[in-house]
Amino acid sequence: MKKLLLAFGLFATAAQAKSPADSVTIRKIYTEILGNSPSYEWLRQLTKGVGPRLSGSAGAQKAVDWSKQLMEKQGFDRVFLQEVMVPHWVRGAKEVAYIQNGKQKITVPIAALGGSIATAPKGVEAPVIEVKNFQELRDLGAEKVKGKIVFFNRPMDPTKLNTFEAYAGAVDQRGNGASEAGKLGAVGAIVRSVTTAMDDNPHTGGMRYATGVPLIPTAAISTNGAELLSKSLKENANLTFYFKQNCEMLPDVKSYNVVGEIKGSEKPEEIIVVGGHLDSWDLAEGAHDDGSGCVQSIEVLRTIKALGIKPKRTIRAVMFMNEENGLRGGVGYADYAKKNNEKHIAAVESDEGGFTPRGFGIVGTAEQRAKVMPWKPLLAPYGLHDIGAGPGGADIGPLAQFGTVLFGFKPDTQRYFDFHHTGIDRFEGVNKRELELGAASMTALVYLLDQYGL
Ligand SMILES: [Zn+2]
């Protein structure tokens, strides 16, 4: 215990030694962003002006052009595109679904999952078998599943405080449900929307077919729809479910990551990345997911410039393409880094919504995390208390192979999954001040990373 106290004492001393100038700079960062940030207006342009921007769509190309022009206007040292080939999945005409319970036909909201095949043009109608997990499905066996629509109805665990943990505990149904059901001869898979909300918004999201399994169509059903279907099945196990969807996977399309850069003055070869993903789901304006992360990242560089900070290291804002249904941008970015022998010391990603900041998750060694701990007193006055081991981000994940330390920006995510991958992830759902506080916390972290390295 004494040793521990001593260790904390040392950390405190180290932090205090750094803190006078640093705390003044961090205060200036917050003053600049809370007083003058254009990031909320940028988010309006990206969500209302550009709109939905699923990989391969015209909207995605518009978002590339928009963010490139925006960063050029900021006068960053370099703005460039990195070419990546992305999947091009299209939803087609809006889906139709209903429960046929005896003579009663009840329409329910569904959304095809990204990557799914279409149903036959007339749709598919079949009896339903409800399961909570893959084991339960396997235990039923092909005999009971064949010819049916499998209904995966395990909710996100509401007792988990970390909503991302609850999400991780349920999302296998969306990602692999169709393959698991297809293997056993099912004709369709309907998945309860992965959200903590109870409403009528279906939440789409990525799925993929395992190799060698029969391909069956799959869609998300709203949580209210899932509750109704489950209740109806208890009353009448012989009811049928009908759905029709018109989606299609087209050939890959050329797209881009968009990168803005401020060159380092002392160690330009050491790169610090801050980023979000530019693509969104087709149903959404992509305000929380992840327009917020994009405009916050650009705001980090704008603020550094506006305050006349001359970073020692090179700071890059990266708008990654195709996080949602392929991660080709994140993988491609790491490939470029390898090819060009670039040295990325740290990468920060904001992809958990534009909500009130709480801290940062760190992916790195215990020694690297220990280097960050003395910065805690500098960040605590701004509500950043949750700093420690934790997830980084999907797009920056591939940089871990080079030993890059990853930081995941952590806002309050209790309401994030209300919006996630739905039509209500709109500009109106993001609060200006919360968005700016996020940008300021990311700028403060990037500033410290630049000052002290890792
Ligand atoms: Zn996202």
Image (spheres, helix red, strand yellow):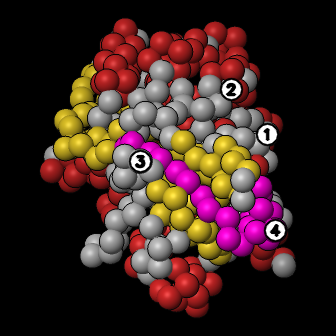
Tag 1, which secondary structure? loop
Q: CA distance from mark 4 to mark 1?
A: 50 Å
Residue at 29 percent of width and 35 percent of height: 56
Up the image or down, 40 lies above or below 425; here it is: above
Looking at the rendering, the stretch of residues picked out in magenta corresponds to: 225-247
Q: Earlier in the sequence, mark 4 or mark 3?
A: 3
Looking at numbered disc 3 in the image, what kind of residue is underneath it?
Lys
Please say if 102 is above or below 443.
below
- Mark 3 to mark 1 CA distance (whole Å): 54 Å
Instruction: Find numbered disc 3 in the image and state the secondary structure of the residue it sits on.
Output: loop
Report the residue marked by disc 2.
Answer: 430
Q: Decide if residue 444 is in sight here.
A: no
- Furthest residue in direction front, as rendered: 103
Q: Which of disc 1 and disc 2 is earlier in sequence?
A: 1
**Local SS, label 2:** loop
Label 3 lies in ligand 1 vicinity (Cβ under 8 Å): no
N-term mark: 2 or 4: 4
Counting from the top left corner in percent of width and height, residue 40 is at 61, 16
Measure how far apart labels 3 and 2 are at the Cα level.
Answer: 39 Å
Within-10-Å neighbours for mark 3: few <14, some 14–19, many 20+: few
The N terminus appears in which quarter of the rendering?
Answer: bottom right
Q: Which residue is mark 4?
A: 235
Q: Residues within 10 Å of mark 1 (few under 14, many from 20)?
A: few
Identify the residue position indicated by label 3 in the image: 122
The Cα atoms of the two marked residues, 2 and 1, are separated by 19 Å
Is residue 228 within the magenta segment?
Answer: yes
Q: CA distance from mark 2 to mark 4?
A: 41 Å
Residue type highlighted by circle 4: Glu
Q: What secondary structure is found at the residue carrying circle 4?
A: helix
Seen from the viewer's position, the closer of residues 382 and 276 is 276
Q: Residue at x 67, y 71 (%)?
A: 238
Tag 1: amino acid:
Gly
